[in-house]
Amino acid sequence: MKEDIARVRLSYGRAIAKRGFLERFYNVFLSSDSGIAKKFANTDLDKQQELLAMSVNMVILFPQENKIAKNAVSRIRTSHGSSELAIEPRFFDLWRESLILAVSEHDPEFDAELEVSWQKVLQIAIDYIREGY
Ligand code: HEM
């Protein structure tokens, strides 16, 4: 897992350095289910992109028992749970797939092996957030 995290961190760094990466993620994610677009109907997506950029780092560091990441992901677990934003658990698979698609298009070193690392790393925080629903 340590290796996977290291590779994913570098991949994320390469992807986010490219113009249009976060915008592409939101385009894919919001069009993947009408229920998702509805949730973001009143959201300032420019601001949301900044929050996302930071929180993906926290999601990546979460499996390493990083304290700051643990706090950040715990907050997201609460805010996305049934008594706050009420994000349906199934939407998290679309979130993961949209992010990986955007990374695959923006990281020039992306390959099948790296995709497996991304899947593994993201799944841990996603499972934790979903359990909080
Ligand atoms: C691991 C995956 C996700 C991460 C890291 C994440 C991260 C965040 C963060 C950092 C915020 C800012 C407010 C807060 O701290 O709670 C936020 C807000 C929000 N997220 Fe997520 N999110 C994830 C998955 C999702 C999914 C699957 C949906 C599905 C629709 C979603 C919908 C929203 C909405 C509607 C807001 C509020 C936007 C607003 O303020 O108008 N998120 N998310």
Image (cartoon, rainbow, N blue to C red):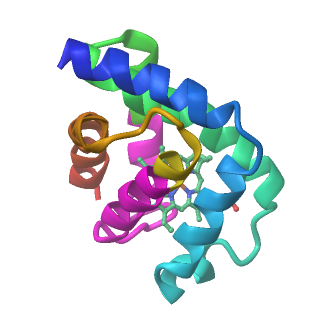
**Quarter of the image holding residue 26?**
bottom right
Judge whether residue 26 is colored magenta.
no
Horizontally, is 132 left or right of 97 in the view?
left
Q: Quadrant of the C terminus?
A: bottom left
Horizontally, is 36 left or right of 88 in the view?
right
> Residue drawn 77% across and 43% down?
19
Across and down, in percent, residue 75 comes to 46, 36
Across and down, in percent, residue 73 comes to 41, 33
Q: Indicate whether 70 appears above or below 124.
A: above
Across and down, in percent, residue 118 comes to 31, 38
Horizontally, is 16 left or right of 65 in the view?
right
Where does ligand 1 appear, by image quarter? bottom right
Judge whether residue 87 is colored magenta.
yes
Residue 16 appears in the picture as rendered = yes
**Quarter of the image holding residue 37?**
bottom right
Residue 71 appears in the picture as rendered = no
Examine the residues drawn in magenta and state their main secondary structure. Answer: helix
What residue range appears in magenta? 74-101
Q: Indicate whether 45 appears above or below 128.
A: below
**Quarter of the image holding residue 114?**
top left
Q: Quadrant of the N terminus?
A: top left
